[in-house]
Image (cartoon, grey):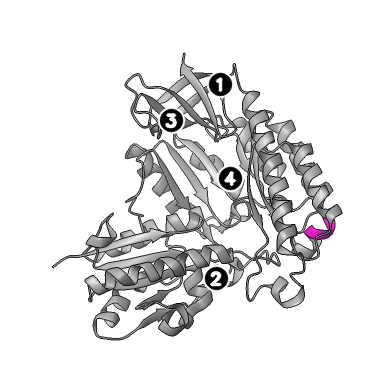
Amino acid sequence: MEKKIYIETYGCQMNFSDSEIVASIMTENNYSATRDAEDADIIFINTCSIRDNAEQKVLNRLKQLQVLRKQKPNLVLGVLGCMAERLKTELLEEAATGSRVDMVVGPDAYRDLPQLLLDVESGHKAVNVILSTEETYADITPVRYASNGVSAFISIMRGCENFCTYCVVPYTRGKERSRNMKSILSEAHDLFERGFREITLLGQNVNSYQYEDEKSGKTITFPELLEAVAAIDLSLRVRFATSHPKDMSDELLQVIARNENICNSIHLPVQSGSSAVLKKMNRKYTREGYLERIAAIKSIIPDAAISTDIIAGFCSETEDDHKQTISLMEDVGFDFAYMFKYSERPGTIAEKKFDDDVPEDVKSRRLQEIIQLQNKLSLRSNRADIGKIFEVLVEGKSRKSEKMVSGRNSQNKMVVFPDKGYKPGDYVIVKIRDCTSATLKGEAV
């Protein structure tokens, strides 16, 4: 009888993309996907290790699932992804985690899942956390099992070699390797033909994409790939994430500027406004270098929205370092930001070389100041859009009212407006009438 799998995903967009790859591999091997954990024979938890809080959420969830295991003794529970790669055999030790796990599978071993499940069925624990230098899953068409039918992710590369001192990603996802451009374009074409109208090209650092074409001997760069995807059709919107400031070239900005269907939204993580802290983080740029890239974005793409990541309380961060972050935020005027307290991750360079010496109460206070400022910046940015007209891609009904629909503009801002029979995937011209710090409110014109 066909067995059912349930996949629960934590963390970044790459993890959600990976879960779609896992779903494809499993359905090709006569398993079916379910949206109900209680209906499943196999539960995969696709995990994130970027912060301790992310791992604690997974550990708590694994404990919760032990209740379901008592009701279904044959239920198979597997941990996938970055946390599986980092903790490996510890996850299989029930005494250490307070939960029983049958499988631990790293992000480069998903092709082996069907065989690993056979090992579990024969009474063995199953582990495969070997990192690859070649795996990109280029030949696998992801199953968009959790998609809204409008937007989709395409993974264009895997791994990272930047070795920021605070980050576990190089250790959990391995070396950078870029996917065959032909397979990326094929997937994008297929998505468009199936009705998807927005794709996001994903990588730990998309703008370091480089693919060596064997036939021509030419190296294809990210700006070339991005423009080729945009050329599929003008009604296909293209986004990308995430960029590293050191690789944000003028060439890439010019590609965005001359292609109207490449969204004017750039996520450019800064992490800190202090050059001293950036050096300690091994970010490979200074405060001045980052601001120079911001100036280039604003010059070449004047209406671009800029978002960022910020870490509060990194090792030995002083009050002056923190104030430099605050002042940089004010100088840039970020439209949106992901903001976190520093969380020391085992095995990173920072954990080995630096003291996590900023007190927790100081980290919390600094983070709160960053959040409060960003809320003001986001509201200011949205207020500046009142009276403007945007093309909005409808994603579906508003969460708060069946009479309203919601979607995003090119700047990746959520727009809510009255429903006049619109369908997901429709483009609607909307004039902005009001806003909150998180949402634009308008009406079709």
Residue furthest right as drawn: 320
Which disc, if any, is residue 221?
Answer: none
Which residue is labeled 4 in the image?
Answer: 224
Q: Earlier in the sequence, mark 2 or mark 4?
A: 2
Q: Secondary structure at mark 2?
A: helix
Residue 406 has which mark? 3
> Is residue 336 left or right of 414 when viewed as pictured?
right
Q: Amino acid at mark 4?
A: Glu
- Please, what secondary structure does the residue beneath circle 3 have? strand
Q: Residue furthest top?
A: 445
**In-image side of 351 versus 328 (left or right):** left
Q: Residue placed at 36% from the left, 41% from the top?
A: 148
Total numbered labels placed on residues in the image: 4
**On the picture, is 380 further left or further right than 173?**
right
Badge 4 vs badge 3, beta-carbon distance below 8 Å:
no
246 is higher (above) or lower (below) than 375: below
State yes or no: residue 277 in magenta.
Answer: yes
Judged by its main secondary structure, the magenta piece is helix
Point out the stretch of residues depicted in magenta: 274-278
Q: Check disc 4 and report its element: helix, strand or loop.
A: helix
**Neighbour class for label 1 at 10 Å: few (<14), some, many (≥20)?**
some
CA distance separating discs 3 and 1: 14 Å
Please provide percent x and percent y for residue 99: 39, 77
Can you tell which of label 1 and label 4 is closer to the viewer? 1
For label 2, the residue is 172
Q: Check disc 3 and give the amino acid type.
A: Ser
Residue with the mark numbered 1: 434
